[in-house]
Amino acid sequence: MKQRFTYPITLTPDDVDGGFVVTCRDLPEAITQGDSVLECLEEAEGALEAALNSRMYRNTSIPAPSSPLIGEHLVAVPLDTAIKSALYLAMREQGVTKTELARRLHIDEKEARRITKPGHGTRTATMDKALRAVGLKPALTLM
């Protein structure tokens, strides 16, 4: 299962306040703004991260990114959020509970809850093991 966490965003000029309003058609709750294109792209990362974390907390779906349309910019979510999201999606798809993840990793359930908690700083090696426990082989692509 190949997953991507780079979403297309739209910058709409804000005629009233200046700068741009940033939106993402895949994650409509990810809205932010900025004075420059560069600032908008940086702010978009945080908005996308917040949207994905919120969806994981609420146990709702995370959509795959759409192909970008003309004029849209691609923004990748922060790496730790992409990794947590990939684990979340795999667990949802396979019906793997936190208890089952703990069993597969030979850890207690409390630690499995920490591993899967959005925003919790989990070591990369631990996330690698968790992803492999649900059949994913992590690979890094840089933009």
Image (cartoon, rainbow, N blue to C red):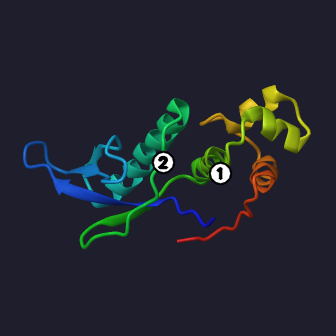
Identity of the residue furthest to the top in this view? 110
Which residue occupies the foreground of this view, 59 or 8?
A: 59
**Where does residue 87 sit, x and y in percent of width and height?**
66, 49
Nearer the N terminus, badge 2 or badge 1? Answer: 2
User: Crowding near pointer 2: few (<14 within 10 Å), some, many (20+)?
Assistant: some
Does residue 109 appear left or right of residue 57 in this picture?
right
Q: Amino acid at mark 1?
A: Ala
Quarter of the N terminus within the rendering: bottom right
Does residue 6 appear left or right of residue 17 in this picture?
right
Q: Amino acid at mark 2?
A: Ile
What residue does disc 2 label? 62
Does residue 80 appear left or right of residue 67 in this picture?
right
What residue does disc 1 label? 90
**Where does residue 48 sit, x and y in percent of width and height?**
43, 47
Which residue occupies the foreground of this view, 102 or 70?
A: 102
Identity of the residue furthest to the left in this view? 16
**Where does residue 7 sit, x and y in percent of width and height?**
41, 59
